Image: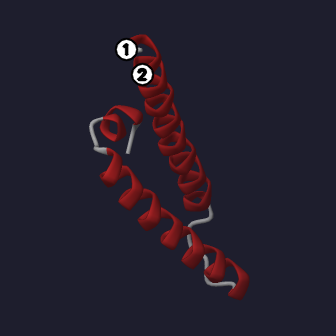
């Protein structure tokens, strides 16, 4: 998923997505350890997607804090 698609998701959907991705990442790390990994680039893609999601979550948190400060 690209950043625009991720930004369209709600906070709950982002949390669900990151859980799904971390589960896939764990499975891929296991496959790598036992020598069954067929697509090593997928690990890199997963890491990047996790970073994108966390960045979007942080942006939303900062925007919310600024909004609260301006309201008071």
Residues under labels 2 and 1: Cα distance?
5 Å
Percent x, y of residue 10: 28, 44
Q: Is residue 40 above or below residue 48?
A: below
Q: How is the image coloured?
A: secondary structure
In the drawing, what numbered circle is on residue 21?
none
Q: Is residue 63 left or right of residue 37?
A: left
Residue in the image at 55% along x and 60% along y: 42
Q: Is residue 56 positioned above or below 40 on the image?
A: above
Relative depth, front residue between 3 and 61 = 61
The kind of secondary structure element at disc 2 is helix
Report whether 37 appears left or right of 11.
right
Mark 2 closeness class: few <14, some 14–19, many ≥20 residues within 10 Å: few
How far across and how far down the image is residue 40, in percent?
62, 64
Q: Nearer the viewer, residue 63 or 53?
A: 63
Q: Nearer the viewer, residue 18 or 29?
A: 18
Is 5 displayed left or right of 64 in the figure? left
x 45%, y 65%: residue: 19
**Is residue 64 or residue 20 the one in the foreground?**
64
Secondary structure beneath label 1: helix
Image point (37%, 50%), residue name = 14
Q: Which residue is mark 2?
A: 68
User: Is 43 on the left or on the right of 13, as rendered?
Assistant: right
Residue matched to label 1: 71
Q: Residue furthest bottom?
A: 34
Q: Quadrant of residue 9?
A: top left
Q: Residue at x 43, y 31 (%)?
A: 60
Q: Considering the image in quadrants, where does the C terminus appear? A: top left
Residue 47 vs 35, above or below: the answer is above
Q: Are marks 2 and 1 in contact (CB under 8 Å)?
A: yes
């Amino acid at each position: 998923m690209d950043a625009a698609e991720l930004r369209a998701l709600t906070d709950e959907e982002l949390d669900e997505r990151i859980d799904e991705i971390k589960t896939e990442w764990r499975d891929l790390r296991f496959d790598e350890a036992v020598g069954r990994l067929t697509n090593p680039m997928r690990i890199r893609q997963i890491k990047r997607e996790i970073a994108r999601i966390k960045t979007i979550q942080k942006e939303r948190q900062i925007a919310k804090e600024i909004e609260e400060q301006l309201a008071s």
